[in-house]
Amino acid sequence: MIKNFAEIIQAAQAKGPKTIAVAVAQDAEVLLAVQQAQALGIADAILVGNAAQIRQIARERHIGIERFTIVDQADNTAACQTAVQLVARGEAQVVMKGLVETAVILKAVLHKETGLRTDNVLSHVAVAEISGYDRLFYITDAAMNIDPDVLIKKQIIDNAVQVARALGNDQPKVACVCAVEKTNAKMQATLDAAALVTMNENGELKGCTVAGPLALDNAVSVTAARHKGIVNPVAGQADILLMPFIEAGNMLYKSIVFFARGKIAGIVVGAKAPVVLTSRADSDIAKLNSIAIGILMACNAPGCGGQSVV
């Protein structure tokens, strides 16, 4: 089981390279990330966006983009559509968000005729490496589903399990994170958590072990769980942190980056191909880590061996 980003990079090197289509690529951190991915043998790239700006940024920051194909498309909406269509046609295997709003690229991904839409719910999974922990955390959903009901949460868990399995965790532990550890009729998240546990016990939610409601402390800390007398296989050992709504997920994601100085990556799951999606404020390293996860997700799909990374 992969436990940190160094191991993710190594696994992606063994599986790659694959081709990523970058939508609105005129961003220094994006270009640095794809340059590093190419140098590491993880990915090649097709850069879609304002060609003049892409080349100017590359010159000013001494970023080598000579080996990449550049598709000149100054309009951001059209650039997103072009990048998605490259993947739909099989010319690339992963879509990557560049300097563009999330809603714009997701609209292209979800287009009924030219996009990568499936019947599945799309959700964002943030993968975090935090000092002092012996495992990666999968935080979901911090970017897409605003206030999911219990059936949407079930699909969000399914998507996160796919990411964990692509990184070698074949039976991830899922904590339904709430403010308290007991169900409360006035707190819908706790009722959803109890329902998801029942779905897991009944075999409706497979490939993972679900517990909840759990507060964040007793989801990730064995000491906190023991102190509160919580005994189950997930307490203190959670891999996947299912957040109750988008604000909670987004704040946890950014707290890890700016307070804990943790390492982070972001991927959207549920489409026909992985979508690398990080905050525009994220570093080139976060974007590189996200590319590596996208490559592993693409290689875990049918037609690329379909095997988890061990």
Image (cartoon, rainbow, N blue to C red):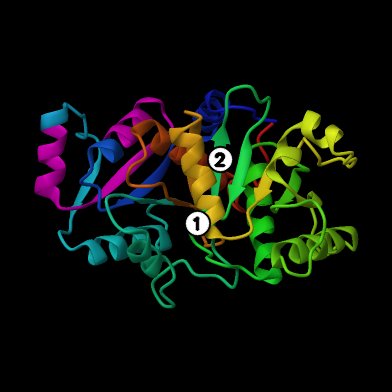
Tell me the distance, in whole angstroms, between the alpha carbons under discs 2 and 1. 18 Å
Q: Earlier in the sequence, mark 2 or mark 1?
A: 2
The residue tagged 1 is 273
| Image position, residue 67 (x, y; %) | 24, 35
Q: Is residue 83 above or below residue 294?
A: below
Bounds of the magenta segment? 32-59
According to the picture, the residue beneath numbered tag 2 turns out to be: 127
Residue sitting at x 55%, y 30%: 8
- Image position of 1 (left or right of 78): right
The kind of residue on which mark 1 rests is Ala
Give the number of the mark in front: 2 or 1.
2
- Residue at 49 percent across and 70 percent down: it is 117
Do the residues bearing badges 2 and 1 touch, measured as CB atoms within 8 Å?
no
Q: For this rendering, which residue is in front, 187 or 273?
A: 187
Q: Where residue 270 sits in the image (x, y, percent)?
A: 56, 61
Residue 57 left/right relative to 94: left
Taking the image as shown, residue 97 lies to the left or right of residue 54, namely: right
In the rendered image, is residue 117 in sight? yes
Give the main secondary structure of the magenta stretch: helix
Judging from the image, what secondary structure is the residue with disc 2 in? strand
| Image coords of residue 18 (percent x, y) | 44, 42
Question: Quick one: 212 or 58, which is closer to the camera?
Answer: 212
The quadrant in which residue 231 appears is: top right
